[in-house]
Image: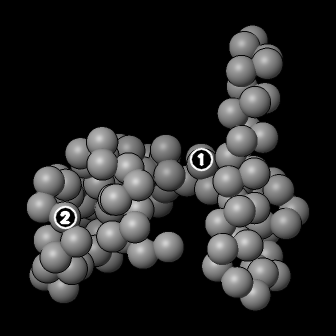
């Protein structure tokens, strides 16, 4: 799925959190070519931080990836087609949401 397709399917997205590796002009220009209404916030690590440091908003991405990697089918890239991988990603996301909705505790 390309970025144009992603932003076309989800026009309500207003902010994009990105890692420090995406702070260059190439990414910014590519995103501007796809959509103009997205605000980019680069989550950077502090220069004075030593060892492990929790970065703001980064933990949301890391936690979501960890939850999805608990699904064995997504742990390794076995799929030959992107649409199959996307389908299994959606199934895993639905599974996570249903567990949250059914077990509110």
Q: Position of residue 10 (x, y in %)?
A: 38, 50
Horizontal side of residue 22 vs 51, given as left or right: left
Residue in view at x 24 percent, y 45 percent:
14
Task: Mark 2 or mark 1: name the one nearer the start of the chain.
Answer: 2
Q: Secondary structure at mark 2?
A: loop
* Residue denoted by label 2: 35
Q: Residue at 35% of width from left, 44% of height from top?
A: 56
Residue 43 visible here: no
Question: Crowding near pointer 1: few (<14 within 10 Å), some, many (20+)?
Answer: few
- Which label number is shown at residue 63? 1
Q: Indicate the quadrant containing the C terminus: top left, top right, bottom left or bottom right.
A: top right
* In the image: residue 37, left or right of residue 83: left
Percent of width and height locating residue 69 = 74, 59
Q: Residue at x 62, y 56 (%)?
A: 65
Question: Residue 43: horizontal and vertical position, in percent?
Answer: 29, 57
The image's colour scheme reads one colour
**Quarter-wise, where is residue 4 in the image?**
bottom left
């Amino acid at each position: 799925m390309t970025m144009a397709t992603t932003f076309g399917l989800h026009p309500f997205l207003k902010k994009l959190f990105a890692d420090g590796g995406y702070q260059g002009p190439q990414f910014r220009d590519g995103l501007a070519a796809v959509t103009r209404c997205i605000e980019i916030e680069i989550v950077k690590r502090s220069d004075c931080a030593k060892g492990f440091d929790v970065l703001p908003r980064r933990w949301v991405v890391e936690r979501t990836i960890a939850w999805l990697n608990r699904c064995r089918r997504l742990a390794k890239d076995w799929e030959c087609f992107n649409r199959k991988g996307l389908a299994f990603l959606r199934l895993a996301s639905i599974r996570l949401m249903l567990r949250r909705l059914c077990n509110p505790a």
